[in-house]
Image (tube, rainbow, N blue to C red):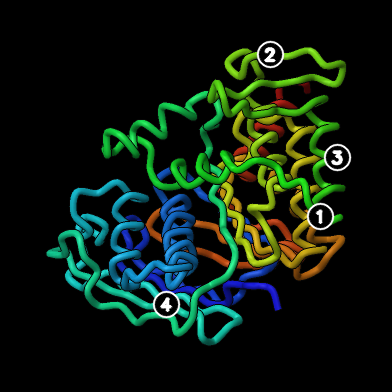
């Protein structure tokens, strides 16, 4: 059985006073206005999942507390962990995640006085297999060497662990052995969208884009959308992603044309359906919501929507049952009404 997040409970977690969900699907859409908690939720989930993947991996003898503490600090870029606790909360931050594998659950809590260590941790009984990936809103290919230097040489805040983990994953060369046929099809579709591919040259430490006729361009002269899609192509090619992975994508629409958004989401839906890979996506885009609504109508129960609002508990619904009430859709409708009024 592929890995899957079943239940999450969060209290006093930064901008999220309370969040509970036991209705996660293959694809989970997170929407809401700025500063309502979308990225906080993504990073909290990613930190937990990646920590469970690093726990007991190979010869690593670090405790779960040590792994989690470091991951939280570098992912959220805080001087002390207590800064993650909601300022108005008198109670501690609490987090609990349950998965389909009962031996791979995680629970922790800490107060505002916590420094660099999470001391109250209920540790998973086993390590989670696979490699999960967080694709941030900003592209990373043109900043590849800068991100490495910031973390590995300078050891300074700037690019959080979502960026650092991603560039390490992208550095892995494409696998020449057997890969999933599902990924081969997905890669073919992605390359059709960008009319070429992006390659990394180990000797120079630089990325280049090659179009379908073989012309080569530096990554700095390449469109942002091409770079974003190429990241997914590379992760599928080098085998970093497998059926145990969880994908976290922050602001999927960033730098993508609406047509590319639809193609990208079709690919995400395909690999999720065929491989059982769970996906979490945050967005401000009406196109993303609408496309996922159409995917949900084709596959009822496949897409869960989590809608964050200011000073309100998140609303959770099955996207096949209708578009949720939220400011993105309301604004789109209002603009349409204004346009009709002007035309008339």
Dot 4 alpha-carbon crowd within 10 angstroms: few under 14, some 14 to 19, many 20 or more? many
The one nearer the camera, 122 or 53, is 53
Could you tell me how far apart the alpha carbons at marks 2 and 3 are, in whole angstroms? 21 Å
Which residue is found at the position 77% from the left and 46% from the top? 176
Q: Along the horizontal axis of the image, is 67 left or right of 58?
A: left
Could you tell me how far apart the alpha carbons at marks 1 and 3 are, in whole angstroms? 16 Å
Of circles 2 and 1, the one toward us is 1
Of circles 1 and 4, the one toward us is 1
Could you tell me how far apart the alpha carbons at marks 2 and 1 are, in whole angstroms? 29 Å
Which residue is found at the position 42% from the left and 77% from the top? 106
Disc 3 element: helix
Please report contact status of discs 4 and 2: CB closer than 8 Å, yes or no.
Answer: no
* Residue at numbered disc 2: 217
The one nearer the camera, 324 or 57, is 57
Residue 3 horizontal/vertical position (percent): 63, 72
Q: Along the horizontal axis of the image, is 341 left or right of 55?
A: right
* Residue at numbered disc 4: 106
* Residue at numbered disc 3: 188
Q: Disc 1 or 4, which lies upstream in sequence? A: 4
Could you tell me how far apart the alpha carbons at marks 3 and 4 are, in whole angstroms? 37 Å
Q: Is residue 2 above or below residue 159?
A: below
* Residue at numbered disc 1: 178
Q: Disc 2 or 1, which lies upstream in sequence? A: 1
Please report contact status of discs 3 and 4: CB closer than 8 Å, yes or no.
Answer: no
Whether residue 204 is visible to the viewer of this picture, yes or no, is yes
The one nearer the camera, 53 or 267, is 53
Please report contact status of discs 2 and 1: CB closer than 8 Å, yes or no.
Answer: no
The one nearer the camera, 56 or 101, is 56
Q: Disc 3 or 4, which lies upstream in sequence? A: 4
């Amino acid at each position: 059985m592929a890995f899957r997040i079943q239940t999450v409970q969060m209290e006093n977690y930064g901008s999220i006073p309370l969040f509970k969900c036991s209705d996660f699907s293959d694809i989970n859409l997170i929407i809401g206005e700025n500063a309502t908690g979308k990225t906080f939720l993504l990073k909290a989930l990613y930190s937990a999942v990646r920590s469970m993947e690093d726990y007991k991996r190979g010869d690593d003898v670090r405790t779960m507390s040590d792994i989690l503490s470091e991951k939280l600090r570098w992912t959220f870029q805080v001087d002390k962990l207590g800064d993650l606790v909601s300022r108005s909360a008198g109670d501690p931050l609490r987090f609990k995640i349950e998965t389909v594998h009962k031996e791979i659950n995680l629970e922790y809590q800490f107060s505002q006085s916590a420094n660099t260590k999470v001391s109250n941790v209920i540790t998973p009984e086993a390590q989670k297999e696979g490699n999960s990936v967080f694709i941030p809103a900003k592209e990373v290919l043109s900043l590849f060497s800068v991100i490495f230097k910031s973390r590995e040489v300078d050891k300074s805040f700037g690019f959080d662990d979502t960026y650092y983990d991603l560039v390490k994953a992208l550095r892995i060369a494409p696998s020449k052995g057997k890969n999933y046929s599902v990924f081969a099809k997905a890669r073919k579709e992605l390359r059709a969208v960008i009319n070429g591919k992006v390659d990394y040259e180990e000797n120079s430490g630089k990325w280049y884009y090659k179009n379908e006729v073989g012309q080569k361009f530096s990554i700095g002269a390449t469109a942002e959308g091409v770079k974003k899609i190429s990241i997914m192509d590379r992760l599928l090619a080098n085998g970093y992603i497998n059926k145990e992975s969880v994908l976290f994508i922050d602001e999927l629409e960033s730098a993508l044309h609406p047509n590319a958004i639809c193609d990208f989401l079709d690919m995400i839906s395909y690999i999720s359906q065929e491989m059982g890979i769970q996906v979490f996506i945050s967005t401000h885009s009406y196109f993303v919501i609408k496309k996922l609504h159409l995917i949900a109508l084709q596959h009822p129960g496949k897409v869960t929507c989590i809608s964050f609002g200011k000073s309100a508990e998140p609303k959770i619904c099955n996207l096949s049952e209708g578009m949720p009430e939220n400011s993105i859709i309301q604004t789109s409708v209002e603009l349409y009404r204004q346009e009709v009024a002007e035309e008339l």
